Amino acid sequence: MISKKMEKALNDQLNFEMYSAYVYLAMSAHCESKGLKGFANWFNVQYQEEMMHAMKFYNFILDQSAEVELETVKKPKKDYDTLLSIFEETLLHEREVTKRIYKLVDLALDERDHGTNAFLQWFVTEQVEEESSVNQIIDKLRLVQGNGNGIFLLDAELATRVFTPPANTAA
């Protein structure tokens, strides 16, 4: 059983994960509308990952005999100036997720909630991977400097990404 404070914090993160999915779905739609199907695919996979993350929180909350509280999902931004700017915003968003996960870990440690702390360690590792992945794309976008041939090749590379859920997506 988790404390009411932890229950609220986990619900807040569940809802932020839903918002994150919405953000990436909007980014996917933006790229699709620009004819960048590979970039759209990359963001669509991000959307699927965020939905899986939300479900991990959902299941964990329920497994702790706590109550899930779903909130209204805020409307995400839909227009971006450049591919570089969309990925820079993605990095900022992922850093916000990381900060939130770290705060949850801190709360779990403060409350001596070892079960929640163990659950959250998967997300700590996941965020390292998320930020690294986005940084690699930013580096490539800076390298090609908006060059059409470079964008074309990067779009083709990102089109190959597929969503592969982890073997155990439950809490």
Image (spheres, rainbow, N blue to C red):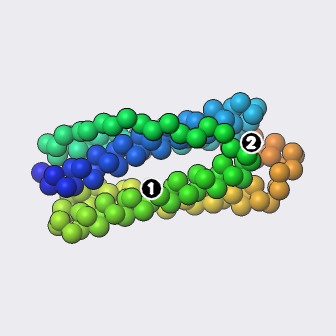
Is residue 7 left or right of 83 when viewed as pictured? left
Residue 40 in percent (x, y) is at 65, 36
Residue at position x 37%, y 35% from top?
A: 72
Residue at position x 66%, y 39% from top?
A: 79
Is residue 85 left or right of 133 when viewed as pictured? right
Q: Amino acid at mark 2?
A: Asp
Residue 73 in percent (x, y) is at 42, 36
Of marks 1 and 2, which one's residue comes earlier in the chain? Answer: 1
Residue at position x 71%, y 61% from top?
A: 139
Pointer 2 residue: 155
Pointer 1 residue: 97
Which callout, 1 or 2, points to the residue nearer the camera? 1
Residue 85 vertical placement versus 77 (above, below): below
Instruction: Name the element at disc 2.
Output: helix
Q: Amino acid at mark 1?
A: Val
Q: Residue 14's image quarter?
A: top left
Residue 143 vertical placement versus 37 (above, below): below
